[in-house]
Amino acid sequence: MPLHLETARLTLSPWAESDADDHRALAAERGNGMPSVEDNRRVIQAQLAAPARTGLALLVVNRRDVGDFIGYCGLTVGRTSVDEPEIAYELFRRVHGQGYATEAASAVLDAAIATGRKRLWATVRPWNTPSFRVLEKLGFERDHLSTDDRGGLVWLTRSLP
């Protein structure tokens, strides 16, 4: 998977240590408080190491016109496998509803197709209606339900050409 992607409005690129404060603020929007600096460094280090280990990456999403960090998007093993990875994205609430998640995820989908993979997965909490809309636009379909320690998960999948 390429580690640099561009769309009309966005650039997707690897993590940098300078993304730490923005990532902490994004994680805090989940409602579990602000992660510690050390925990956040570990998360970023894991993201920097992932491409060498799996060939997959969650990439930082920046707006091209402003240059600001607005979230991340990419492919991850997550709850799946290297051959059939999971697409994942998370953006600041302040940029929701502007099409950025769909635009970033579409670029990642195209990159996944270029790798020759045959299927992608996504997992979404049942309450996350905006994520379902993004995935539906990209052709994902509901596959099954499961639960984990945080509650229900809806599994979606998309076959790739």
Image: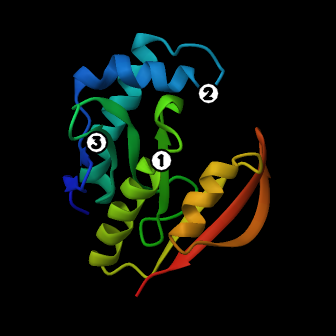
Element assignment for label 2? loop
Mark 3–mark 1 Cα distance, whole angstroms, equals 18 Å
Residue at the disc numbered 2: 30
Quarter of the figure with the C terminus: bottom left
Q: For residue 42, what is the image quadrant?
A: top left
Q: Pick whichever of labels 3 and 2 is earlier in the sequence.
A: 2
Could you tell me which quadrant the N terminus lies in? bottom left
- Place of residue 105 in the rendered image (x, y in percent of width and height, measured from the top left): 42, 58
Residue at 58% from the left image edge and 56% from the top image edge: 79
| Mark identifier at residue 49 | 3
- The one nearer the camera, 61 or 154, is 61
User: Whole-percent x and y of residue 113?
Assistant: 34, 77
Residue 9 located left or right of residue 124: left
Taking the spot 45% from the left edge, 57% from the top edge, the residue there is 102
Looking at the rendered image, the disc whose residue lies closer to the viewer, 3 or 1, is: 1
* 42 in relation to 75, above or below: above
Mark found first going from the N terminus, 3 or 1: 3
| N-terminal-most mark, 2 or 1 | 2
Residue at 48% x, 11% y: name it. 36
Quickly name the residue at label 1: 89
User: Do labels 3 and 1 touch, CB within 8 Å?
Assistant: no
Asked which secondary structure carries label 1, the reply is strand
* Left or right of 128 on screen, residue 65: left
Q: Along the line of sight, which residue is nearer the eye, 49 or 118? A: 118
Given this view, does label 3 or label 2 mark the residue nearer the observer?
2
